[in-house]
Amino acid sequence: MNKDMKVKKISLDNLLTDENTEVINQMYEVYKVCFEGWKKDEFIQYLVKVGARPSQILLIFDKNDVVGYNIAIIRKFVLQRKKVYVVSADIALLPKYRGQVANLIHIFLHGLLFKITHPFSRIVYVDIIMNYKMYQTMVNAVGLIPNPQQEIPEGYKQIIKEVVTSDGFKLEDNGYAVSTHDKIHYQVPDELKMRNLKLYQYFMEKTNNATYGLTVLMPGTYLNVFKGLYKFILKKIGKQYKRLHQAAGRN
């Protein structure tokens, strides 16, 4: 992350004040670069809805300009008379800054802090992923399911159904794909496809060639959370070492 970039945590109450109108405008401009589907007033209503739940809103700045946002949401469901806390995320970052901000680490840290304060609660990460790169990253890091080696266990399918329904969506016949309100602006590079062709083909099959979003799940155990943090941090260290090595080679 370059020296002009910073990550700032903000509450919804502060975000929706008149003095932050320009911040919301910039967030919406980031949304439009990454996705399409919501009008500005719908985007603001989404933020209001998010703020009514336990959530963490992070804004990513380059100097004074918003270049991305990271929203982690925690919701409580009651299934078969047992509480289940569901963590999900909404991430958008302008293309030129991707790889400079450890977005997923913030999500795992948020989940870890919640797990520590609710040690005996059942916590599950459930989300709808439209970006294959994000899907591949999380499958490699924490074994996100479904994937070619593991389908979603029966015991978790009701959780997925409840989450998708509460968001106003409907699962397709294959039980994984969801038609969402917005579409992603992202083309998968050939190099990324070839890193794991089997995984790419699996993702495209489940999402009908990326027409739909893919509903994914990860049990929020300490092992999964720490494993995710470890792998993402290790990856960032590796990238930093590679950049330093390349810089030394040029000198």
Image (tube, rainbow, N blue to C red):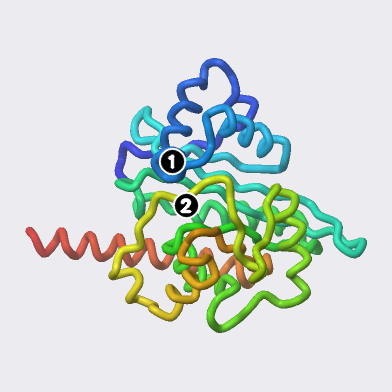
Percent across and percent down for residue 206 are: 54, 70
The quadrant in which residue 226 appears is bottom right
Q: Is residue 23 above or below residue 56?
A: above
- Amino acid found under the numbered disc labelled 1: Gly
Nearer-the-camera pick, 157 or 19: 157
- Helix, strand or loop at disc 1? strand
The quadrant in which residue 49 appears is top right
- Residue 2 numbered mark, or none: none
Looking at the figure, which quarter contains the C terminus? bottom left
Residue on which disc 2 sits: 103
Nearer-the-camera pick, 28 or 122: 28
The answer to the question of whether label 2 and label 1 lie on touching residues, with beta carbons closer than 8 A, is: yes
Residue name at image x 47 percent, y 69 percent: 204
Residue name at image x 59 percent, y 55 percent: 179
Are there few (<14), some (14-19), or many (20+) residues within 10 Å of tag 1?
Answer: many
- Amino acid found under the numbered disc labelled 2: Asn
Are there few (<14), some (14-19), or many (20+) residues within 10 Å of tag 2?
Answer: many
Question: How many numbered marks does the figure carry?
Answer: 2
Give the mark toward the camera: 2 or 1. 1
Q: Is residue 213 above or below residue 28?
A: below
- Helix, strand or loop at disc 2? helix
Residue on which disc 1 sits: 68
Residue name at image x 75 percent, y 50 percent: 166
